[in-house]
Structure formats: C-alpha cells, structure tokens
Amino acid sequence: MPADSESSCSAISSAKVHQQLGALTGQLHDSLTEFGLAAKVKDWTGKLSDAKIHLSYIAGLNGEATENMMAQDFHDLNGQVIARVVNLAATVEDQLMPKTIRTSFPTHRTSDQLASQGF
C-alpha cells in the first residue's frame, strides 16, 4: 500500500474515532443531565482536583520519608562500624597493655606496685 493511501486511511479512521468519541461524550452528558447528576459531576471535578493536590503532597512526603529512612540506615551502619572499631581498639589495648608493662619494667613488680606508680 502506498504511503499516501496509508496516511489517508489513518486520517479517516482518526476522524471516525473522534466522531465516535464526540457522540459518546454527548450521550454521557445527556444521561447525566437526565438523571440530575450534571451539577454533582461538576462538584466532583473540583474535588478531584483537590484530591490530586493532596495525593501529590502525600507522594512528596512519602519520597522524603524514603530518603530519611535510607539516611537512617546509613547512619545506623556507620554507628555499627564505629562501635566495632572502638571494640577492636579496646581489645588490642587490653592485650597489649600487659605485654608493654612487662617489657617496659623487666623486674618483677606486683600489680599493687605498678598501680602505685600510675600503671
């Protein structure tokens, strides 16, 4: 099928779809008016706009909460790493201190003597 034929078929079907949509919209409007719902529909459209604003606000808060939760998780992990490093340093200190004292003071001294000298 030549390109001109395709575009003209597309234009015809597009125009037909628009015509059918227009007819459906007209029928819907007539039905709503007949049932006395036209005024309520206008009121609903205003409420839908408000609802969209509120939902957008909630979505924004949800996004902020997610960022805060991720930051909190990162903070918690940092705290855990810091606690492990402090624990490791304390363990190393506990293990090295007696060896340091023994090598620094080759004579036998009791722990009371060392304590009196500030060790």
Image (cartoon, rainbow, N blue to C red):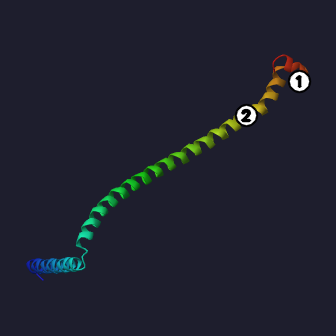
Residue 113 figure quarter: top right
Near-viewer residue (116 or 60): 60
Near-viewer residue (104 or 19): 19
Instruction: Work out which quarter of the rendered image holds the C terminus and state it.
Output: top right
Near-viewer residue (7 or 47): 47
Q: Is residue 65 left or right of residue 45?
A: right
Q: Earlier in the sequence, mark 1 or mark 2?
A: 2
Mark 2, residues whose alpha carbon is within 10 Å: few (<14), some, or many (≥20)? few
Q: Residue 52, image x and y in percent?
A: 33, 60
Q: Is residue 74 above or below residue 5?
A: above
Near-viewer residue (69 or 93): 69
Amino acid under label 1? Ser
- The residues tagged by marks 1 and 2 sit, at their Cα atoms, a distance apart of 20 Å
Q: Residue 101, image x and y in percent?
A: 82, 24
Q: Which residue is mark 1?
A: 111
Is any part of residue 54 visible from this angle? yes
Residue 7 figure quarter: bottom left
Instruction: Work out which quarter of the rendered image holds the N terminus and state it.
Output: bottom left
Q: Residue at x 77, y 30 (%)?
A: 96
Residue 25 figure quarter: bottom left
